[in-house]
Amino acid sequence: MNFYYGQSLGVADFRSEQQYFLEKLRLHNRCLHGYGVVCGLEIEPVPTHEDCISQDDSKRAGLRASMREIEKKIAQHKQALEKGSEDAEQIKEELEKLYAEREALQRELDGLPPCKPVDESIPAQVLLNCGFALDCHGRELIVRTPVLVDIWSLLSPTQRRQIRESTDDQQDSSPVVELDLSICYCEQPTYPSRPVITNTCDAIANCVYGRTREGYRLQVSLTPATPDKRCDPCCEPCESECVLLARIRWNPHAPITSDDIDLGVRRMLALYETTRITGISWKHGATYAPAQAKAVLGTVREQGPRSDGLEVVFSKQVYAETLQPGVVDLWRVQGGGGLRGVISHVEGSYVDKPGTGLISAFKYRDDSGETLNSGDRILITIRAGFILDECCKPVDGIHVGGLVPQLPAYQQDKEQEEESESVPPCAKRPAYKVPWTSGNGVPGSTFESWIFVS
């Protein structure tokens, strides 16, 4: 606006000036900072009700923990069957035993007294902490105080009916429903008043709102949110105007716990969400016996089949043709008695990697067949700056703190697992409380890891 003395100003003039500065601010947010969670907005379980009646809480917790362990083993065995394991018959027998154990635990769990408040059923509630986020239009989402969220009240009648139908179909096990909890921008008119003068063309209004309060609303969806696949978020329109906060596994017959809340699905503030390494088949810094280390590396054996070696999983798809020779390297640092500290290159190759196209993971194994001795160390190097994702941007590969998690399907590979391993510092991201991945927000760099042989 260009104001001057004697100018006649109307409502449209003031509105256009406000809209101009709002759009400039949101353009700055969207194109320079991106969108996502800036800070806070963690979803936490609500503490158990004080009037909760339970004769044996510790037993109930133990049974549920045992069932979770059995579910993990079942998933690992199913993956082994899908990969065409030679021990298929033995795996099927173990699966039958696991199914029987799960059923017995479920019967024992069902026989315990229900844990719920005296005068009401178990509420589907979580706690939303205060925080700040930007949506994909650059609009600010501010939660100033913690909010108790009743998930059931956010569901539409259609969604409630779908949940009832799905839980009725799961008669043989604990019914579980997956929900996505998101936060969305909304505006609310405030300061109602009666106008002194009205537009001659309009009817006389009894009440007009003088201000608009920027706020938020919470949304629950039964359909998992689709990842943002835009390569240029600044100029391309977004599909969802809401910011995903958490994915919740909800059992209508039990309170929501921290194990049911997955914060790893949320998007942190970024102009472009870089592709990262989300899981590896080995445990960084772990010590393996020589035979076990060969299985981890997929080393050539004189007798018996060899494994597929190392597996690396990405958060997004990458171009297979960018995984050229030299991008992944294995090095052996010689230890033990005699000559020590000699570094030698270990020849390797990709396993079943397509020549072209997009892939979400790759496997790489040792082709040298060299003998591994006690005291050796194997260095694993992935030059992430040479690996390009579907938007032709390099992978954000720096191995921050050595905390990229081991893939669940390989967690039984370690020969001697300590019963109570010490939790490393920052095992959970202190600010975000989500699982670690590679990367610090800057595309490129090199992923480094190692294992010991003993």
Image (cartoon, rainbow, N blue to C red):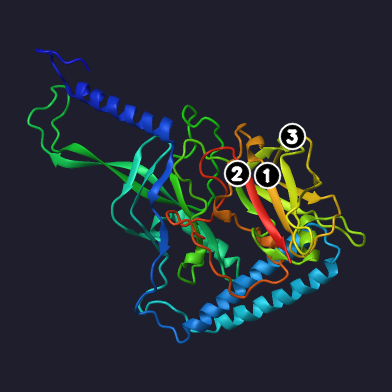
Q: Residues within 10 Å of mark 1 (few under 14, many from 20)?
A: many
Q: Secondary structure at mark 3?
A: helix
Q: CA distance from mark 2 to mark 1?
A: 8 Å
The disc, 3 or 1, on the residue closer to the chain's N-terminal end is 3
Marks 3 & 1, CB-CB < 8 Å contact: no
> Which one is in front, 444 or 100?
444
Estimate the x, y position of residue 23 in percent, counting from the top left.
Answer: 33, 28
Vertical placement of 190 versus 152: above or below? above
Q: Secondary structure at mark 2?
A: loop
The answer, for residue 210, to whether it is visible in the render is yes
The answer, for residue 162, to whether it is visible in the render is no
> Which one is in front, 260 or 413?
413
The disc, 2 or 1, on the residue closer to the chain's N-terminal end is 1
Q: Residue furthest right?
A: 303
Q: Residues within 10 Å of mark 3 (few under 14, many from 20)?
A: some
Q: CA distance from mark 3 to mark 1?
A: 15 Å
Q: Identify the amino acid type marked 3.
A: Glu
**Which residue is the site of mark 2?**
397
**Which residue is the site of mark 3?**
321
The disc, 3 or 2, on the residue closer to the chain's N-terminal end is 3
For the point 75% across and 58% down, the residue is: 340
Q: Identify the amino acid type marked 2.
A: Gly
**Which residue is the site of mark 1?**
382
How many labels sit on residues? 3
Q: Identify the amino acid type marked 1.
A: Ile
Estimate the x, y position of residue 324 in percent, counting from the top left.
Answer: 75, 36
Estimate the x, y position of residue 189 in percent, counting from the top left.
Answer: 23, 40
For the point 70% across and 61% down, the residue is: 452
